[in-house]
Image (tube, grey):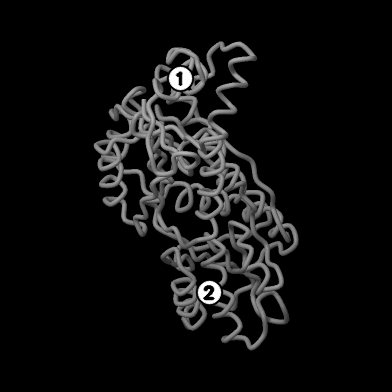
C-alpha cells in the first residue's frame, strides 16, 4: 500500500514497508493499525506520532484495489435546484461523509429515461451503491431495481420488493384536507395537480386530499382539476386559466400538489382578485412540502411539512447497511409528517 506525504517528505510517496522501517515495527503491524486491528498501546503511539510528523495519508486508489471498493455512491435526483431535493441530498451526504463515502450526483431534470441512464452508468462505473430519489417508477425502473447487482435504495416512492424510504403522502394530504374542510365546510374548491405517473404526488396526495375535503362536504369535480408541471410558472398558468374560465364558479379554495405550484397559484389569485389568497373574496390556496421561501414570501399558507432531510439520512443509512450485508431482505420505511398553518 502507498502512502502520500504532506509533511517531512511533502509530495513524496511511501510504502507501508518504508513507514514500518521509519517507526521500527513490522509492515504487518502498520497494516493492523491502519485497519483498526490489535496493536499495543506503545506501538500505536509510535505509529500515530510518525504519521502526524510526516503527514502521510493513505492512498485511496491502493485501498480500493485492496478492498475491491470505490467508496463512491451514485445519487440520482429529479431536479437539484429545488429546496426539497437540497434537503434530501444534505441528509444523504451527512451520513455518507461520516462513513467515508463520496457522493456522485446525477440530475435528470424530471426525465424518467435519464434516471435509468444514470443508474446504468453508475452500475458500470462502478460505485459501491446507489440512491434513487424517484418520481416516475416505470416497469423498466422496477426491473432494474430488482435485478441490479449493485445495492440500491429508493427515496420518495414505494416500490414492492425494493429497499425504500418514503413519506405518508396520502395520510398527510388527508389530514390537510380534513383540517381545511373543517374550517370551510361545503367550500367551492379546485385542484392544481400533477401527472399520475408520479404515484406519490399525482395519485396518493390527490386521493388523500379528496378524501380529507369530503369529510367537510367539499367535492372537486373533474372539470376543476388542472394538471401542472412541478414549477411555479406552471402553477400560475393553470390557476390563471382556471380563474378566467367562465364555466368555473367563484372559488373558495385552490388545493395544490406542491408548494412551488401553490406559489404560482397565489400569484394568479392576487392578480385576479387584487388581494392575497385567503383574504377578502380571494380563495385560500394550500400547498404541500413546507417550502421555506414560499412560506416566508407569502406570510404562510396551509401545507404539510415532510422530513426530507430525514429521508436522506434514513436512505443513506439503509444503503450502508445493505452494502455491508448484501443478503439483507428488502425493507421499506414510511416517515411521518406535520400539517402547518391549517
Comparing 338 with 1, the one in front is 1
In whole angstroms, how far apart are the C-alphas of marks 1 and 2?
A: 65 Å
Q: Give x and y (percent) for residue 325.
A: 44, 19
Q: Is residue 293 above or below residue 101?
A: below
Taking depth in this image into account, of 295 and 322 the one nearest to the observer is 322
**Farthest right residue?**
183
Residue at the location (24% across, 37% down)? 124
- Tag in front: 1 or 2: 1
Q: Mark 1 near mark 2, Cβ–Cβ under 8 Å?
A: no
Q: Which quadrant is home to the C terminus?
A: bottom right
Q: Secondary structure at mark 1?
A: helix
Judged left or right of residue 165, residue 42 is right
Q: Which label number is shown at residue 8?
A: none
Q: Secondary structure at mark 2?
A: helix
Q: Is residue 61 left or right of residue 43?
A: left
Q: Which residue is mark 2?
A: 264
* Residue in view at x 65 percent, y 74 percent: 297
Please give the name of the residue rendered at 59% of the width and 28% of the height, measured from the top-left corner: 49
- Asked if 235 appears above or below 221 in the picture, the reply is below
Q: Quarter of the image for the N terminus: give it.
A: top left
**Quarter of image, res 125:** top left
> Measuring 47% from the left and 35% from the top, which residue is drawn there?
57
Compare marks 1 and 2 and give the one earlier in the sequence. 1
Q: How many marks?
A: 2
Q: Which residue corresponds to mark 1?
A: 20
Amino acid at each position: 500500500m502507498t502512502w502520500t506525504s504532506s509533511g517531512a517528505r511533502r509530495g513524496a510517496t511511501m510504502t507501508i514497508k518504508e513507514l514500518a522501517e521509519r517507526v521500527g515495527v513490522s509492515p504487518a503491524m502498520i497494516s493492523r493499525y491502519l485497519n483498526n486491528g490489535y496493536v499495543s498501546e506503545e506501538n500505536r503511539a509510535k505509529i500515530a506520532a510518525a504519521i502526524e510528523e510526516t503527514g502521510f495519508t493513505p492512498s485511496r486508489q491502493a485501498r480500493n484495489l485492496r478492498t475491491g471498493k470505490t467508496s463512491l455512491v451514485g445519487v440520482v435526483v429529479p431536479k437539484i435546484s429545488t429546496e426539497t431535493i437540497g434537503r434530501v441530498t444534505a441528509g444523504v451526504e451527512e451520513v455518507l461523509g461520516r462513513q467515508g463515502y463520496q457522493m456522485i450526483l446525477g440530475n435528470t431534470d424530471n426525465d424518467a429515461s435519464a434516471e435509468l441512464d444514470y443508474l446504468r452508468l453508475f452500475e458500470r462505473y462502478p460505485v459501491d451503491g446507489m440512491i434513487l430519489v424517484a418520481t416516475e417508477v416505470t416497469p423498466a425502473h422496477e426491473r432494474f431495481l430488482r435485478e441490479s447487482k449493485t445495492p440500491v435504495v429508493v427515496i420518495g416512492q414505494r416500490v414492492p420488493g425494493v429497499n425504500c424510504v418514503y413519506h405518508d403522502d396520502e395520510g398527510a394530504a388527508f389530514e390537510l384536507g380534513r383540517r381545511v374542510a373543517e374550517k370551510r365546510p361545503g367550500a367551492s374548491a379546485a385542484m392544481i395537480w400533477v401527472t399520475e405517473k408520479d404515484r406519490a404526488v399525482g395519485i396518493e396526495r390527490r386521493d388523500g386530499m379528496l378524501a380529507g375535503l369530503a369529510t367537510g362536504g367539499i367535492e372537486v369535480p373533474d372539470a376543476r382539476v388542472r394538471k401542472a408541471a412541478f414549477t411555479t410558472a406552471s402553477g400560475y398558468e393553470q390557476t390563471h386559466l382556471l380563474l378566467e374560465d367562465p364555466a368555473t364558479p367563484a372559488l373558495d379554495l385552490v388545493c395544490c400538489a406542491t408548494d412551488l405550484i401553490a406559489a404560482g397559484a397565489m400569484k394568479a389569485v392576487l392578480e385576479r382578485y387584487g388581494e392575497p389568497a385567503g383574504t377578502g373574496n380571494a380563495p385560500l390556496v394550500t400547498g404541500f412540502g413546507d417550502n421555506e421561501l414560499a412560506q416566508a414570501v407569502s406570510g404562510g399558507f396551509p401545507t404539510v411539512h415532510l422530513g426530507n432531510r430525514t429521508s436522506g439520512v434514513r436512505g443513506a443509512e439503509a444503503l450502508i447497511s445493505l452494502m455491508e450485508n448484501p443478503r439483507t431482505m428488502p425493507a421499506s420505511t414510511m416517515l411521518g409528517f406535520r400539517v402547518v398553518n391549517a
